[in-house]
Image (cartoon, rainbow, N blue to C red):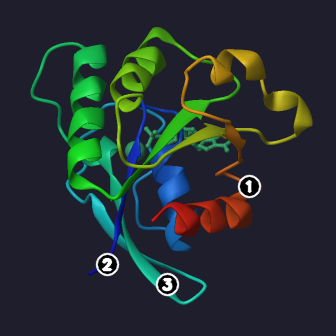
Amino acid sequence: RVPTLAIVGRPNVGKSTLVNRIIARREAVVQDIPGVTRDRVSYDALWRGRRFTVVDTGGWEPKVDGLQAAVALQAEYAMKTSDAVLVVVDAMVGATETDEAIARVLRRSKKPVILVANKVDDERAVSDAAQLWNLGLGEPFAVSALHGRGSGDLLDIILDKL
Ligand code: GDP
Ligand code: MG
């Protein structure tokens, strides 16, 4: 059986960009405008000879009102249907109310959770690391999905958790 990694996070944090990094192809649709419908959610990934499936939950069309409820539902579903969950936050923005809503769900997860602080294009890009620690999801792992910074190390961590 091929293990599944779900990518969760609020719109525009760089989930699809990170998916493209992880699968080493450009298939996930990156949008500057959040909330655009995308149908494709599953991608095949291969790292160090191991196969896994990446699920971009940003491709789901939320059927509930309100962003917080929608992403909390996505996190809930991801937790139930995947072997590990990767939460993406925007390090330039820091933890928002919506990130906190996602974290509340995932703190109950019995499956491995990886917290990724994206958009760390250079050392200065982390707005407040302590605030990210306060999400209660462990150590935030800094990457730049856009430039590829930290992506190899992140893939090793993913394999470790799957
Ligand atoms: P999603 O809605 O979470 O899937 O986010 P997208 O992957 O569509 O990205 C949203 C925007 O953030 C796009 O304009 C991306 O180019 C940008 N972005 C994604 N990753 C990075 C990054 O590491 N650094 C910077 N500076 N921008 C990024
Ligand atoms: Mg997306």
State which tag comes first along the sequence, 2 or 3.
2
State which tag comes first along the sequence, 1 or 3.
3
Residue position marked by numbered label 3 in the rendering: 50
Asked if the residues shown at circle 1 and circle 3 are in contact, with their CB atoms under 8 angstroms apart, the answer is no
Asked if the residues shown at circle 2 and circle 3 are in contact, with their CB atoms under 8 angstroms apart, the answer is no
Q: For this view, does 159 lie left or right of residue 131?
A: left
Q: Amino acid at mark 2?
A: Val
Give the image quarter of residue 68: top left
Label 2 neighbourhood size at 10 Å, few (<14), some (14-19), many (20+)? few
- Nearer the observer, 144 or 29: 144
Residue 56, position as x, y percentages in the image: 35, 52
Distance CA(mark 2)–CA(mark 3): 9 Å
Query: Relative to residue 147, is residue 105 depicted above or below?
Result: above
The residue at the point 20 percent across, 54 percent down is 39
Q: Furthest residue to the top?
A: 97
Give the image quarter of residue 93: top right
Q: Which element carries disc 2, helix, strand or loop?
A: loop
Q: Amino acid at mark 3?
A: Arg
State which tag comes first along the sequence, 2 or 1.
2
